[in-house]
Amino acid sequence: MAQSAGFCYGVKRAVETTKKIKAENASKKVWVLGELIHNSHVIKELDEMGIMTVDVLPENETGICIVRSHGMAPQKIKEITDKGFEVVDLTCLDVKKVQQKAIQLAQEDFLVLILGKPEHPEVVAINANARIYSENVFVVQDLDSLKELTDKIKAHKRVGVVIQTTQKIELLEEIIAYLLPISSELKVFNTICKSTTMRQQEAKELAKTSDLMVVVGGKNSANTTHLAEILKDITSTIHIETADDLDEFKNLIEKSENIGVTAGASTPENIIKNVIEKIEKI
């Protein structure tokens, strides 16, 4: 079992604080705009407590609106406040740092590159924050999308880089290697959070001595998906959401002598525990 598997402090803070807010405001409606964390079991648990996850806040309603751990565009927060909702900002502190670094680069007239998935809520929020100060802000998800910006980069000369907190270090290294020869001034902030880096390193070490790695977490969780991608290059790897998913891989588990288990930052402890127990039974 990898030591750093499961909830990171940002996720833990978001989940515990949201539950506390509901407990202390029983008479008020509590809404989360988008999934608080990328784990369907946690979302279901919150729903059962009366904490509603929605894509759009309903009209003619009030209450408390939680800004999830991924952050939110400032314009969106103002819009929610103007509608009469009380906003509680639970953006992860590491994500806040990325937003601040992107804003700093934009204010200093760097062409800003945000490395990550364009549709990921964290990246959407970082982009929105930086674009208040400059139009020269771009999201880059891979080397191909960076190459499309080559002419703009050469013309601007000053380039600043931040990266989604749950991304792979390999992406950052690849992007820097391409940028060095074509930019006059390059300022890079490695904003991958320490929890993600530690989780990936531990899992890599564990994979080296394992016949099989089991990665536990939501299929829509970026950091969990990246874990599985990294480990597949080292040893046989499966990505599951719950213990029930292990039935599909029973033969593979029976054939494996050493099995390593890790989990994403949004995977609850009880789900990890259930997976380990089922592996032991098999």
Image (cartoon, rainbow, N blue to C red):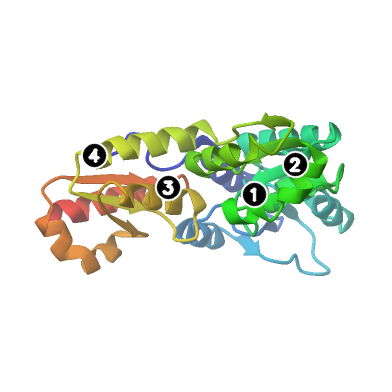
Which label's residue is closer to the chain start, 1 or 3? 1
In whole angstroms, how far apart are the C-alphas of marks 2 and 3? 29 Å
Q: Secondary structure at mark 2?
A: strand
Q: Say which residue appears at 19% left-offset and 39% top-offset.
A: 209
Q: CA distance from mark 1 to mark 4?
A: 31 Å
Ranked by sequence position, the earlier of labels 1 and 4 is 1
Q: Secondary structure at mark 3?
A: loop
Q: Is residue 69 above or below residue 193?
A: below
Instruction: Specify the amino acid type for callout 4.
Output: Lys
* Left or right of 25 in this view: 13: left
Label 4 crowding class (10 Å Cα cut-off): few <14, some 14-19, many 20+? some
Instruction: Identify the residue position indicated by label 4 in the image.
Output: 208
Q: Which mark is residue 264?
A: 3
Total residue callouts: 4
Q: Earlier in the sequence, mark 2 or mark 3?
A: 2
Q: Is residue 74 left or right of residue 125?
A: right
Report, in whole angstroms, how far the alpha carbon at label 1 lies from the one at label 2. 16 Å
Label pair 1/2, CB-CB below 8 angstroms: no
* Residue 20, quarter of the rendered image: top right
In front of the other: 166 or 27: 166
Residue in view at x 55 percent, y 36 percent: 192
Front position among marks 2 and 3: 2
Q: Which quarter of the picture shows residue 2?
A: top left
* N-term-proximal mark, 4 vs 3: 4
Q: In this rendering, does residue 121 appear at all?
A: no
- Indicate which disc, 1 or 2, sits on the residue closer to the N terminus: 2
Q: Is residue 49 visible?
A: yes
